[in-house]
Image: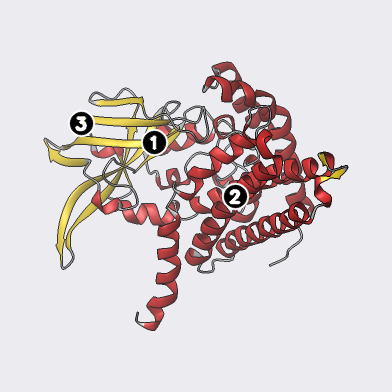
């Protein structure tokens, strides 16, 4: 692994950072205040991303996209992490799982998604099944040659803008020594399908404007043409294409931490108490030193896990370590930054309280910190028979 970026990779970083600073930052206060992204702003960001050649940059050249490596895409996500999630959503990155599309699905879903003509969302989580995907109750049964779906999904990010949803739904059950085990199938479900409703979800303190939605299925009929991959093959599809989503969370956490750190560093250099900048006090200067060390460590851990994927090396444990460390690092950085700002850190004159609130969800979605620790420890212990 080379620790320095190539000229092309540095250009990617500079281009995306400039985009975020010029096209995302100016709208953040509006989104934070209203909890909404105006349609004209959303479409403007999307079109400028398309014009820049970065829309669906996580997809290969074979479908007309930039074909960035895992490492290069992690660099993109790191820079996007500096900005509002609600606004960055329109710097389109469709779900890679759409590469599993076959036949007519390619023209109906894959190609329109990578061209920015249709937007997708991903749905797995249910009120009673989060990390325990096998515990999902949303069920599809065979009837008259179709699949009839009933159940609920929640915490579905981006569904309010989606033209179709990639839904993971139980389609059977096997009896095992450890009890019933659900078989899972991925379906492509169009907005407006009879029996399928997308409604507002819960109000979250993290990432205002980046909404979570509730999906409801009430005798919703889906033909076989809507199955993505093989029937009962949802886990294979999931493991093939959703493997690296945790890198995205880690990378964005690093980007947000660096933006937050910049505020802390400048404030420590400018804010005076007792006749000198507070950065001269060891209590603050040592915090600054610890903060940048943690950020750099998370950055290298994240990029190293992406590099392993590019080298076709086993990376499950390394990705879990990156997601675990980067998200928990972000929590510490935002909290320390708020402490350096003192009372002003809690005021909305600065975005510090927003960074602090936004950081909390990163340790939960795409696999909680506890799930990441389970993945890491299992990877280490299984070869020893434990």
Query: Tag 2 or tag 1, which sits nearer the N-term?
Result: 1
Residue position for label 2: 330
The furthest residue to the right: 275
Write down the quadrant of residue 126 in the picture.
Answer: top left
Q: Nearer the viewer, mark 3 or mark 2?
A: 2
| 312 displayed left or right of 66 | left
Query: Tag 2 or tag 3, which sits nearer the N-term?
Result: 3
Residue position for label 3: 221
Write down the quadrant of residue 77 in the picture.
Answer: top right
Q: Is residue 64 visible?
A: no
User: How far apart are the two marked residues, 3 and 2, measured between alpha carbons?
Assistant: 43 Å
- Mark 1: secondary structure: strand
- Quadrant showing the C terminus: bottom left
Query: Tag 3 or tag 1, which sits nearer the N-term?
Result: 1
| Residue 345 sits above or below residue 315 on the image | above
Residue 27 coordinates in the image, percent (x, y): 65, 23
- Mark 3: secondary structure: strand
User: How far apart are the two marked residues, 1 and 3, measured between alpha carbons?
Assistant: 21 Å
Q: Nearer the viewer, mark 1 or mark 3?
A: 1
């Amino acid at each position: 692994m080379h620790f320095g970026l190539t000229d092309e990779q540095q250009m990617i970083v500079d281009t995306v950072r400039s985009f975020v600073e010029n096209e995302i930052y100016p709208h953040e206060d509006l989104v934070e205040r209203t909890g909404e992204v105006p349609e004209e702003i959303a479409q403007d960001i999307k079109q400028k991303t398309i014009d820049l050649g970065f829309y669906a940059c996580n997809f290969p050249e074979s479908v007309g996209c930039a074909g960035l490596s895992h490492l290069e895409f992690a660099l993109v996500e790191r820079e996007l992490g500096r900005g509002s999630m609600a606004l960055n959503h329109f710097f389109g990155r469709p779900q890679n799982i759409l590469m599993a599309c076959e036949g007519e699905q390619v023209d109906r879903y894959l190609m329109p998604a990578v061209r920015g003509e249709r937007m997708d969302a991903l749905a797995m989580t249910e009120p009673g099944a989060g990390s325990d995907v096998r515990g999902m109750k949303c069920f599809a049964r065979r009837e008259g040659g179709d699949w009839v779906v009933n159940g609920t999904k929640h915490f579905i990010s981006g569904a309010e803008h989606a033209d179709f949803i990639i839904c993971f739904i139980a389609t059977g059950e096997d009896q095992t020594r450890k009890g019933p085990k659900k078989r899972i199938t991925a379906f492509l479900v169009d907005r407006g399908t009879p029996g399928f409703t997308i409604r507002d979800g819960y109000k979250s303190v993290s990432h205002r404007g980046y909404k979570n939605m509730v999906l409801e299925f009430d005798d919703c009929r889906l033909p076989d043409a809507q199955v993505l991959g093989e029937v009962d093959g949802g886990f294979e599809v999931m493991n093939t294409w959703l493997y690296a989503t945790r890198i995205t969370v880690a990378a964005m956490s690093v980007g947000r931490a660096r933006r937050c750190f910049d505020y802390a560093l400048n404030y420590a250099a400018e804010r005076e108490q007792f006749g000198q900048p507070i950065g001269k006090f060891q209590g603050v200067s040592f915090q600054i030193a610890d903060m940048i060390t943690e950020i750099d460590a998370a950055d290298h851990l994240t990029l190293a896990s992406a590099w392993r994927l590019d080298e076709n090396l086993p990376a499950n444990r390394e990705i879990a370590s990156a997601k675990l460390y980067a998200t928990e690092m972000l929590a510490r950085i935002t909290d320390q930054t708020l402490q350096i700002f003192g009372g002003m850190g809690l005021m909305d004159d600065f975005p510090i309280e927003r960074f602090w609130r936004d950081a909390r969800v990163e340790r939960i979605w795409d696999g909680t910190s506890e799930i990441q620790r389970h993945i890491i420890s299992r990877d280490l212990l299984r070869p020893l028979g434990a």
